[in-house]
Image (cartoon, rainbow, N blue to C red):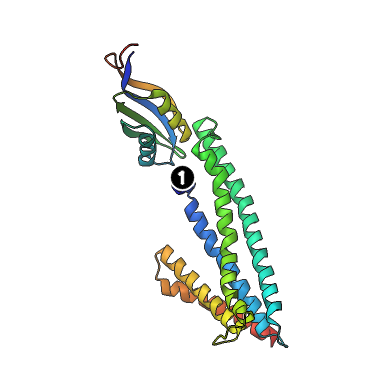
Amino acid sequence: MIGRIRFLLQLTHGQRIARRYFVTNGFDGALTMMGLTMGFYTAESAVATPVVISACLGAAVALAVSGLASAYVSESAERARELRELEQAVVGDLQDTAHGQAARTVPVLIATVNGLAPLAIALFIMLPLWLEQAGMALPLSGLESSLVLAFVSLFLLGAFLGTVSGRFWLASALRTLLVALLTAGIIYFVNA
Amino acid sequence: MPVIKRVVLDVLKPHQPNALEFASAIAGRHDGCLIRITVIEVDEKTESTLLEVQGEDVPYDGIVETIKSLGASVHSIDEVEVSSAGKPQR
């Protein structure tokens, strides 16, 4: 089955698309979580951890559903258009071929990646909040630890991008970290 | 009953799967067949190819079905070798 999925992805260059969606929506998820935790951290009065968790979880779910739905709709339309153009070129119906199957299956796979990427990263960033709520002692507060994980996630996403694009991974990682620090700085000054 | 030993087909295929994957897919589904593909012409979305299949008993209908399932189409049979010294008569 994995071999078949890999074959269908190759037919439509789906791996490239999925990789691109993983990075862009993963970046969205990480930056959104960083923004939320930074907002709570710089709030005038302290916010209870369960409230922070509820807000972050709500945002994570919304990002996942948005990523899933938007990618499925756009990729389905693109694959259907490509299939139609190919059918015109070969002068035949390709619905029952590997290309037809790819046009129906690949949008689901790409939508899954686009939805799961921000959710997984958001849940990773929220981990210290859950640990704090469970009574575990952390070196930093739950919010501070979440902020650190958000910066680490963005750094790693940048490193991944750099590796994939063949550029120096550290430069790419520092670039995304800079974007995160800039965003955190703006939120800090807006709330000051 | 005659058996097909070799057949050369004029096949129009999309760029994906490429010639290697296309030949491998056909060979993978039909044991005992030697597959050779020659790409004759390339245009924006398709490639014209000559697909040669050799074997002790080439399953022509199965080969055509596999070609169609990979998004390609058989335009013509260009060469064929058939042997009458094949399966024994019942």
Indicate the position of residue A5 as horizontal and vertical percent values.
48, 47
Indicate the position of residue B49 as horizontal and vertical percent values.
37, 32
Which residue matches tag 1?
A4
Indicate the position of residue A27 as horizontal and vertical percent values.
56, 68
- Tell me the element at label 1: helix
Which is more toward the observer, A88 or A187? Answer: A187
**Which of the 4 image quadrants contains residue A130?**
bottom right
Which is more toward the observer, A76 or A54? Answer: A54
Q: Amino acid at mark 1?
A: Arg
Q: Is residue B7 above or below residue A144?
A: above
What residue appears at the point 32 percent right and 18 percent down from the top-left corner?
B3
In which quadrant is the C terminus of chain A drawn?
bottom right
**Which of the 4 image quadrants contains residue A25?**
bottom right
What residue appears at the point 29 percent right and 24 percent down from the top-left corner?
B56
**Which of the 4 image quadrants contains residue B21?**
top left
Which chain does tag 1 point to?
A
Indicate the position of residue A159 as horizontal and vertical percent values.
45, 70
- Residue B39 left/right relative to A71: left
